[in-house]
């Protein structure tokens, strides 16, 4: 299977929750505050939190709590080598 990224519509989120974000260990490719990273989500008492190994930002929907979330993609095949993703292709929208 050829790996691909499925874009998550951040505008569907409400406060610190989002109906399309999974907490089952699914990996996501994230653009947060101008930085790209890979992480998984977990649920804590105040909402969703992403763990990327070096940063654990709380998910905030756009226009809520000064959200710094810029883009989010679900990684459909977790065997993908994230070093091979060309960031310029993600910015062509």
Image: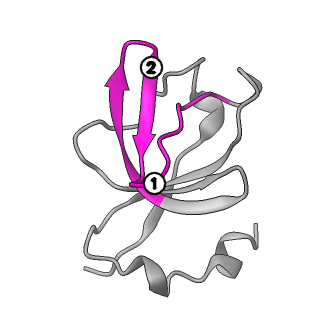
Residue 54 tag number: 1
Residue 55: say if magenta.
yes
Q: Name which residue lies at 36% across and 20% down.
A: 44
Residue 56 x %, y %: 47, 41
Q: Quadrant of residue 31?
A: bottom right
The CA distance from mark 2 to mark 1 is: 19 Å
**Frontmost residue, 46 versus 2:** 46
Query: In the rendered view, does 61 fall on the left or right side of 29?
Result: right
**Over which residues does the magenta segment extend?**
38-61
SS at badge 1: loop
Residue 20 seen: no
Query: In the rendered view, does 67 fall on the left or right side of 9?
Result: right
Q: Name which residue lies at 39% across and 54% down.
A: 53
Quadrant of the frame with the N terminus: bottom left
SS at badge 2: strand
Residue 51: say if magenta.
yes
Residue 11 seen: yes
Q: Name which residue lies at 34% across and 25% down.
A: 43
| Residue 45 higher or lower than 85, as above or below | above
């Amino acid at each position: 299977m050829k790996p691909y990224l499925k874009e998550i519509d951040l505008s569907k989120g409400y406060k610190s929750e989002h109906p399309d974000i999974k907490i089952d260990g699914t990996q996501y490719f994230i653009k947060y505050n101008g930085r790209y990273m890979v992480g998984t989500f977990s649920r804590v008492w105040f909402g969703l939190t992403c763990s990327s190994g070096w940063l654990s930002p709380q998910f905030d929907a756009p226009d809520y709590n000064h959200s710094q979330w810029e883009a989010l993609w679900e990684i459909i095949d977790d065997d993908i080598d994230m070093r091979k993703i060309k960031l310029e292709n993600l910015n062509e929208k």
